[in-house]
Amino acid sequence: MNQKSLHPDIVNQLDNLYLKAKLIVEGFISGLHKSPYHGFSVEFSEHRPYGNGDEIKNIDWKIWGKTDKYYIKRFEEETNLACHIFLDSSKSMKFKTGNITKFNYAKIIAAGLSYLMIQQRDALGLCIFDSKIQSKVAPKSNKSHLNTILSIIDKTKIGGDTNLAPILSAAAEKIKKRGLIILLSDLLDNPQELIESLKHFKYNNNEVLVFHILDPKEIKLKYNNHTIFKDLETREEMATEPWQIQEAYNLEIQKFIEYYKKECFINKIDYNLLITNQSASYALLKFLNKRKKSF
């Protein structure tokens, strides 16, 4: 599959979120086989090699007939990893300078990850929130659960103001079983409080994967004309000549990003910056690497 077909602008043109997710995952797997990652294990956790101590009755003879190798069917308890996706739907996620908002981009990433997790037979949970929880679904691993998750993601609209830290801290108290926490957000909240909330998940032995989603022009303030900037949450406006504040802005946004990078590294949290013109393949690869190393 042509990797250009996985560009967010192209994927976003599809009406059906299931088709978006399927296109992303199948394109990603196809790309792995043609890339430097050739040989990277992308088994969908249906079988594992036969080993000493395994019951002969559990050998899948159909697989043996095709490969001349012994594999046994994985049991449910061997394959289920509890994954929780936390999707930020606050007003700041509405921002865009191209064809796709940060929120719609985050939806595409969440859909692709969900599709891949269910294929892996991982137990998938979802929490969509702004200043409060909008939707919450407990982890399950059956195929019909994917439709439930994707339907909720698809129907969710931009909500209210940002309130990341309290939502995440409260969730960390309720998640008892060790698993993988995935946060999709622009992280436009108090950085110190947010890091503390993510540390709560680590205290309970969860692995944490953060996808920091920003628009290209949030990284570099590239505006050529007199511009009015409006805060999507407070509605406050500021008129300016962008060239006058460009240097100072670029320094501040880099400090903002570097703070998250540093603190996540110190606390053994996986931090990944995602720009809304970037292929979803990157997020899927980071997820598989994390899953492979940690569980």
Image: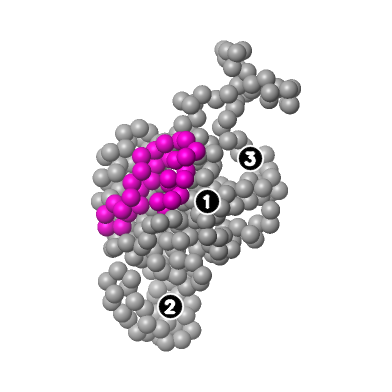
| Sequence-wise first label, 2 or 1 | 1
Residue 18 colored in magenta in the image: no
- Locate residue 92, reporting x and y percent: 36, 66
- Locate residue 48, reporting x and y percent: 60, 26
State the residue at coordinates (30%, 60%): 162
Q: Could you say which is closer to the camera, residue 178 or residue 74?
A: 74
| Sequence-wise first label, 2 or 3 | 3
| Disc 1 and disc 3 in contact, CB within 8 angstroms | no
Residue range highlighted in magenta: 124-153
Residue 153 visible, this angle: yes
Indicate which disc residue 18 carries. Answer: 1
User: How many neighbours does mark 2 have within 10 angstroms: few (below 14), some (14-19), or many (20 or more)?
Assistant: some
Q: Secondary structure at mark 1?
A: helix
Residue 144 colored in magenta in the image: yes
Q: Is residue 130 left or right of residue 264?
A: left
State the residue at coordinates (51%, 71%): 98
Three-letter amino acid code of the residue under disc 1: Tyr
- Locate residue 114, reporting x and y percent: 48, 45
Q: Secondary structure at mark 2?
A: helix
Instruction: Name the image quarter holding residue 33.
Output: top right
Indicate which disc residue 40 carries. Answer: 3
Q: Could you say which is closer to the camera, residue 249 or residue 294?
A: 294
Q: Secondary structure at mark 3?
A: loop
Disc 2 to disc 3, C-alpha distance: 42 Å
User: How many neighbours does mark 1 have within 10 angstroms: few (below 14), some (14-19), or many (20 or more)?
Assistant: many
Residue underneath mark 2: 246
